[in-house]
């Protein structure tokens, strides 16, 4: 089996909720998603890599402390550049099958994704809004990843092999996700059981200033 890595392109749960204008209690949901991605990566025989800003590093280290991981600093001027650099960094560490994912949708069967990468250079899991929740690579694709913009429809650029799933980008997405099978069980997170999803979607959100450009170097 070729060396595998799952790169979580992540913020801390609270900062993820705040950046998307979501109520503070949704941080519990994002924490549950991060934990699920880490366990899914380990189950698929992959190294867990967390790519984040320095401001999020300590909080992300506290999640599933028993799971070994590599921490890398995000770097680049744009979202796409940071995403591309995170994937490139994983390949530079010697991994030959790399999955890059956010933390706002649940993980699919990662073993199946890695198996598909033995036949394809790129595979992706689409989100219902036209973006992608997961990008699997068997070779670096810097230019493609660097072209991705936040909020832009980009699914047409990828050969998708997985079903579409709602990702949580706004309060409206909470109620939609709660109706999807892929999200079954996730809304048992504290204060976000299904009967509370609609209230959470309309609650007063916390706010967070725009994120500053991340550091320009990867910690040794």
Image (tube, rainbow, N blue to C red):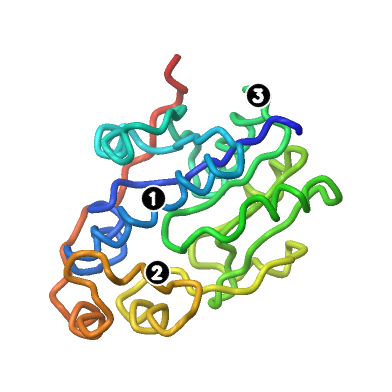
Name the spot of residue 17 as percent of width and height, x first.
Answer: 27, 60
The quadrant where residue 51 appears: top left
Q: Is residue 52 left or right of residue 155?
A: left
Q: Secondary structure at mark 1?
A: helix
Q: What's the residue at 74%, 66% (across, down)?
A: 161
Q: Residues within 10 Å of mark 1 (few under 14, many from 20)?
A: many
Percent coordinates x, y for residue 83 in the rendering: 55, 44
Depth order, front residue of 210/207: 207
Residue 65 occupies which quadrant of the picture? top left
Query: Mark 1 vs mark 3: which is more N-terminal?
Result: 1
Label count reads 3
Identity of the residue drawn at 73% across and 38% down = 140
Instruction: Say the numbered circle drawn on residue 9.
Output: none
Q: Secondary structure at mark 3?
A: helix
Q: Quadrant of residue 170?
A: bottom left
- Residue 217: x %, y % from top left: 46, 22
Q: Determine whether the residue tagged by mark 2 lies in a helix, strand or loop.
A: loop
**Sequence-first tag of 3 and 2:** 3
Disc 1 + disc 3, Cβ < 8 Å: no
Report which residue position mark 3 lands on. Answer: 92
Please tell me whether residue 127 is drawn above or below residue 19 in the rendered image: below
């Amino acid at each position: 089996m070729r060396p595998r890595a799952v790169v979580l392109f992540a913020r801390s749960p609270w900062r993820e909720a705040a950046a998307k204008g979501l109520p503070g209690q949704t941080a519990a949901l994002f924490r549950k998603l991060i934990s699920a991605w880490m366990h899914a990566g380990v189950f698929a025989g992959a190294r867990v890599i967390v790519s984040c800003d320095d401001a999020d590093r300590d909080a992300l280290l506290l999640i599933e402390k028993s799971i070994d991981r590599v921490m890398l600093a995000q770097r680049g001027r744009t979202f796409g550049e940071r995403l591309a650099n995170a994937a490139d960094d994983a390949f530079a560490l010697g991994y030959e099958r790399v999955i890059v994912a956010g933390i706002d949708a649940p993980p699919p069967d990662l073993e199946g994704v890695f198996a598909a990468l033995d036949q394809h250079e790129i595979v992706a899991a689409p989100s219902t809004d036209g973006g992608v929740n997961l990008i699997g690579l068997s070779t670096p694709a810097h230019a493609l990843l660097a072209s991705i913009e936040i909020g832009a429809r980009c699914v047409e650029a990828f050969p998708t092999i997985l079903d579409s799933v709602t990702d949580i980008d706004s309060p409206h997405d909470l109620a939609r996700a709660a109706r999807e099978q892929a999200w079954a069980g996730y809304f048992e997170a504290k204060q976000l059981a299904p009967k509370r999803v609609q209230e959470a979607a309309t609650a007063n959100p916390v706010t967070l200033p725009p994120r500053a450009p991340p550091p320009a170097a990867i910690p040794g």
